[in-house]
Image (cartoon, rainbow, N blue to C red):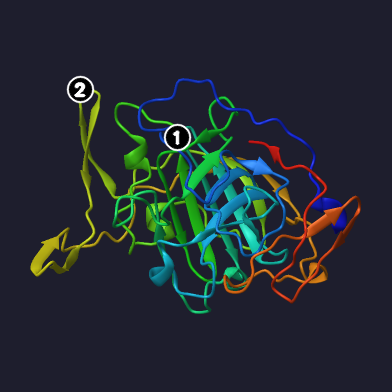
Amino acid sequence: ATASLLLASTAFAQSTTTFPEGVVATGTMGVTNPPEPTTGTAINQTSFSRLLSINSVDDWCIFAPPESQDIADSETIEVAWCTQQRNDARVIPDGTISGVSLLKTDMYVQIMGYGDLTQINIPSGDWGGELDPHGAYGSGNPIGGNVTTNMTIDGETINVAEWMLYVSYEQFCFRACTWANSTYSAAAMCWHELDEMGCEFVMPGNYDFNGTFETCEADVAYPPGWYVEGSSDGTTSFSSFAQYWTGVVDGVTYTQGDLVTPSTVQSTPSSSNCQTVATISNGIDLASLGVTGAATATGSGATATATGSAATATGTAGAASGSSSGSTTAAA
């Protein structure tokens, strides 16, 4: 278990491809995040990093609460939980995830998963919610959240502008939009205003994979809520579904969206060339380090110690202290 605490050095490969407008994020990383995706960062189960990466079936992250709390009540303050030591994030405990399907398409990368996500502070029975880089205040849910991937047209890393993540106590689906064209923008492919519709509507695919860990190529789905109306002179026309909402804001009642909810999506894209692995694991024995998966944000935050091939931890359960003798390394 301790051998995985220090990861091999890998140079950060930033993409030099010219991507369509709206695909690559501009600006800076959130204030709690490292300046770029980084592997080999110290174990810190009280971290407030909000940098996610999607790179492979066993190297990805999702957002979840910093301490046990419903997603609806914590969406602005979620933190990064990763399958590997990276991005200064918290580590998802081995055994948490029971199935993963990772899809690479020409316009987005999508990962769907099942597991016991109470291990990362989502309370049992919480059907969750939707997170995206916009949010009610325009600064993202969570605020300062960023997403990178190297599953791009050139295999190099980008910080994506548009992404969406649905997560509950037992399931998640996560899409990062990596390309665009004159018909389908990245914002349309990662449309974020259908939060009540759920994974199979917004990110259609084969969800019958629990117990399997697979990476597949897949066709591109239509943007969430889009329906084909017809085609004329080689141009396809679409209608779109807007989720119904009514409420009071600053004393004014607003109503918007469609009264009729569609019963299905336009189509479910097919996948092919699927490669499977038996399971995914980081090999980290958190209990032996004196920490748990779902450490709360109270008390003293700390990092685990790794020296050579042996790891030690001090302090009370839920908090380990010390430093790492291995350097963190920038990586895709």
Lower position in the chain sequence, tag 1 or tag 2: 1
Q: Secondary structure at mark 2?
A: loop
Q: Residue at the location (39% across, 52% down)? A: 132
Quick one: which residue is furthest to the right in this view? 309
Left or right of 229? Residue 73 is right
Measured as percent of width and height from the top left, residue 96 is found at 66, 66
Q: Secondary structure at mark 1?
A: loop
Residue 254, quarter of picture: bottom left
Q: Is residue 9 visible?
A: yes
Measured as percent of width and height from the top left, residue 103 is found at 55, 44
Q: Which mark is residue 107?
A: 1
Q: Which mark is residue 279?
A: none
Q: Nearer the viewer, residue 101 or 264?
A: 101
Left or right of 162? Residue 225 is left
Quick one: which residue is furthest to the left in this view? 252
> Circle 2 is placed at which residue position?
233
Q: Residue at the location (48% across, 46% down)? A: 146
The mark total stands at 2
Q: Is residue 274 visible?
A: no
Residue type, label 1? Met
Residue 22, quarter of picture: top left
Q: Residues within 10 Å of mark 1 (few under 14, many from 20)?
A: many
Q: Nearer the viewer, residue 75 or 153?
A: 75
Measured as percent of width and height from the top left, residue 284 is found at 78, 60
Left or right of 326? Residue 249 is left
Q: In the rendered view of the protein, which quadrant contains the N terminus? A: bottom right
Q: In the rendered view of the protein, which quadrant contains the C terminus? A: top right
Residue type, label 2? Asp
Measured as percent of width and height from the top left, residue 41 is found at 70, 49
Instruction: State the CA–CA distance, disc 1 to disc 2.
Output: 25 Å
211 is higher (above) or lower (below) than 134: below
Quick one: which residue is furthest to the bottom in this view? 125
